[in-house]
Image (cartoon, grey):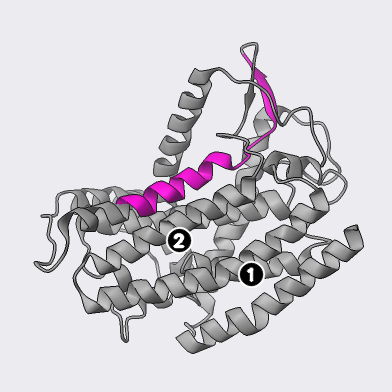
Amino acid sequence: MIQFADVNYFEPWWAQIVKALVIFGIVFAVLPMLTVYERKLLGRFQGRYGPNRVGPFGLLQPLAEIVKFAVKEPFRPTTSIGFLFRVAPAIAILTAVAALAIIPWGNVQHIFGTRFGLYGIDVSVGPLYVFAMAGISFYGIMLGGWASGSKYSFLGSMRAAAQLISYEVSQGLALVGVVITSQTLSLTGIIHAQRGMWYIVPQLLGFLIFMVASFAETNRAPFDLVEADAELVGGYFTEYGGTGFVAYLFAEYVNMIVVSAIATTMFLGGWLIPGNPSIPGWIDPFIVAAKMMIFITLFIWIRATLPRLRYDQLMSFGWKILLPLATVNLLVTAIVVA
């Protein structure tokens, strides 16, 4: 296994607390801006303005909506299970934010004489950590639908769970090809291994499989079947309003950010740029953010372009096309590397 000197090192305990607060704070500051960006971009795609009433150019629209949802009267169906009904959105958003902890935003830097990694933690099983958080988020979906006491919410949660499980297999196999090529599970190690060539070149098929599976994993169009308005209304969060609804909405956007960050790390070299010129370390996070914005824009572009699939088309595509392709990509990579 490849080892890098800058991957494993000691940080003061307080540094972990500071980084955790910074990650949590930045995420909740970026999410409202991301909703405005999506609605503005969708408006341009569809020949309309988008938000333009609250604040200059509609930029304060998220603030108005946050106030609206925060002051809404709490409500839940009489058939719901109170404790689980409230816990389910918390599980969804906490697992999504926890996955951001391992995203590398830059290399190890010396700040005030102390070495800091520009990431939350550098675990030796990075992709496995992400999929572990995704597995726990499954409970947030299932509990949200079941605890609502509504058959439509429950059917929506079952559909979402089946969709999530189906595409996680192909998504995981697509990343295994990168792991075999880099010979490490550390995300910072994978970035260092791409100094010669970004893995989007030798793992192009794996990249395409990962992106398609990620659209289904994050419930984005054309795979947004958990909220198919024709038969399930809003899916597993049909009965949620106010802060519970916002928690599920934010979890979806955080998952989109996580998927974009993982794609940037695994296939686009993280903070590395072509030619690997010597650049100041403080620029690393901006390079990663720029690459992530490419993927986030792609998510929005696809939403404005492609229609929603039928559920049987979704499942057939996942099991009959994506999974065999991911398996072939994994086998070819293993043969070439070995």
User: Can residue 172 be seen by looking at this rendering?
Assistant: yes
Above or below, 318 against 179 in this view is below
- The part of the image, by quadrant, that contains residue 153 is bottom left
Q: Which residue sits at x=25%, y=70%? A: 238
The quarter in which the N terminus is drawn is top right
- The part of the image, by quadrant, that contains residue 251 is bottom left
Rounded to the nearest whole Å, what is the CA distance between mark 1 and mark 2? 27 Å
Q: Nearer the viewer, residue 65 or 221?
A: 221
Q: Nearer the viewer, residue 25 or 310?
A: 310
User: Can residue 220 be seen by looking at this rendering?
Assistant: no
Three-letter code, disc 1: Ser
Residue occupying the far top of the picture: 113
Q: Which residue sits at x=73%, y=72%? A: 327
Which segment did they paint magenta? 90-111
**Rendered location of residue 120, percent (x, y):** 55, 34
Q: Which residue sits at x=31%, y=50%? A: 90
Above or below, 254 against 12 in this view is below
- Answer with left or right where residue 266 lies relative to residue 61: right
> Does dot 1 land on a helix, a strand or a loop?
helix
**Rendered location of residue 75, percent (x, y):** 12, 60
Three-letter code, disc 2: Glu
Residue placed under numbered mark 2 in the picture? 38
Number of labels in the image equals 2
Q: Nearer the viewer, residue 151 or 103?
A: 151
Q: Which residue sits at x=39%, y=43%? A: 28
Q: Nearer the viewer, residue 20 or 79?
A: 79
The tag earlier along the polypeptide, 1 or 2, is: 2
Residue placed under numbered mark 1 in the picture? 170
**Rendered location of residue 180, percent (x, y):** 79, 55
**Rendered location of residue 199, percent (x, y):** 79, 55
Above or below, 95 against 116 in this view is below
